Image (spheres, rainbow, N blue to C red):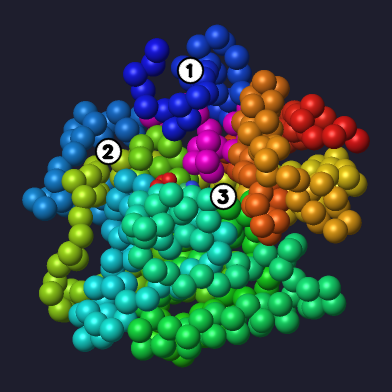
Amino acid sequence: MSHVFHRHLKQRYPTAVGGEGPYLIDAEGRRYLDACGGAAVSCLGHRDGEVIEAVREQVGRLAYAHTSFFTSEPMEALADFLVERAPEGLSSVYFVSGGSEAVEAALKMARQYFLERGEPERRHLIARRQSYHGNTLGALATGGNAWRRRPFEPLLVEVGHVSPCYAYRGQAAGETPEAYGERLAAELEDEIQRLGPETVMAFVAEPVVGATLGAVPAVPGYFKRVREICDRHGILLILDEVMCGMGRTGSLFAAEQEGVAPDLTTIAKGLGAGYQPIGATLVSERIREAIAEGSGFFQHGHTYIGHATACAAALAVQRAIESRDLMARVRWLGDGLQQRLEARFGDHPHVGDIRGRGLFRGLELVADRGDKTPFDPARKLHAAIKRTAMDEGLMCYPMGGTLDGQRGDHILLAPPFILEEFHLDEIVDKLDATLKRVVDPH
Ligand code: PMP
């Protein structure tokens, strides 16, 4: 019996022993095309020589120095790199070890900002239903994923939840995308009024929704309206780019494509591409300034913030993406993947929607394409798809639908940026073989 407390205690997993570009290899020598980067993490694929060398060099020189005693060269250099490329106004970076920690830091920074400004009554958060922002208690409370929240509900702070921007199911027949975006913005404003504008601290959203909805971008103009509403009421905008950031959608930050600048942004996953655990919260100048000129101390911290080796790995990853012009490749490969998915599954009776940006694509599965009825969640289609895809030699990231029928099962694709064109065909072929085995054949 394994002594590892695995996340699923009733399942057996193959043992990963190696990687090669976009493939993972298990102890029996089986190869899996990593079409989801684990969970949108491995954007450079596996065993990248430059990153390995950077990690080796850093560990050899200085693996770690506690940030209550020292700063470090890789941490300073990575902060400079990110700020030079970040949306306007973001001027400093707080480094943590993953996405949930980055979200927790953003929430606490928002709260401390208002305390420093003498607005202690600002304590409410608003986020969106069917969202995921991490599994630690603050991040879990922020998320609107009913299934993940349910067991821990008594431990969660109250957060206002509004509708996600999810055109496939939310946009009414005959409604334009603009009108839909306006309607959602009005819903946010109503929630702010319900809570009392002077008590609201921040609105949190993912620019392109990853895990919970499956690569769903907002309709044009939605985030601009959200930004205006936040500004009108003095509320901070926190954009969670843990999954969609770091080039995944074809720009370093997904917010660039919305034309908005957040007050706080969280990143992780693709930042270190899995070579080291790392996340970060990017902080706007006015927040940094309020805290610097007030107490001068962010009342929060972890042992591993700004881990020197993690920062060196992330810097090597980000430099590689830039020097190899991989973001242009993401856009090109992303278009190719979308075209292939549409060609293969566009008229599949159980594929209701194919969507996304860059190398961040989602397919929503439905029992009935006409009225978008999801499959019965009791069928646990997503689990069967994941298992069968592995059997076909493909890693993809399926997620279950909701019991209330507000969302169908979906499959998220988030492959490495280093794919060759033939890998796109391999993804689509293996996905097709998987769906033929699991979903009713077409
Ligand atoms: N926010 C978003 C948008 C995420 O997708 C995730 C992870 N799936 C998290 C936060 C949490 O990140 P982590 O698992 O690294 O704690």
401 versus 203 height, above or below: above
**Marks 1 and 2: which is nearer the front?**
1
- Amino acid found under the numbered disc labelled 3: Ala
Along the viewing direction, whichever of 1 and 236 lies nearer the viewer: 1
SS state under label 2: helix
Q: Quarter-wise, where is residue 317 in the image?
A: top left
Q: Position of residue 198 (x, y in %)?
A: 36, 88
The mark that comes first in sequence, 1 or 2, is: 1
Magenta part of the chain: 33-52
The image quarter containing residue 59 is: top left
Other residues around mark 3 within 10 Å, as few (<14) / some (14–19) / many (≥20): many
Label 3's element? loop
**Which quadrant would residue 264 be assigned to in this image?**
bottom left
* 51 inside magenta stretch: yes
Horizontal side, residue 370 vs residue 100: left or right: right
Q: Is residue 369 left or right of residue 308?
A: right
Q: Which residue is mark 1?
A: 15
Query: Spatial distance from mark 2 to mark 3, Cα to Cα?
Result: 28 Å
**Tag of residue 211:** 3
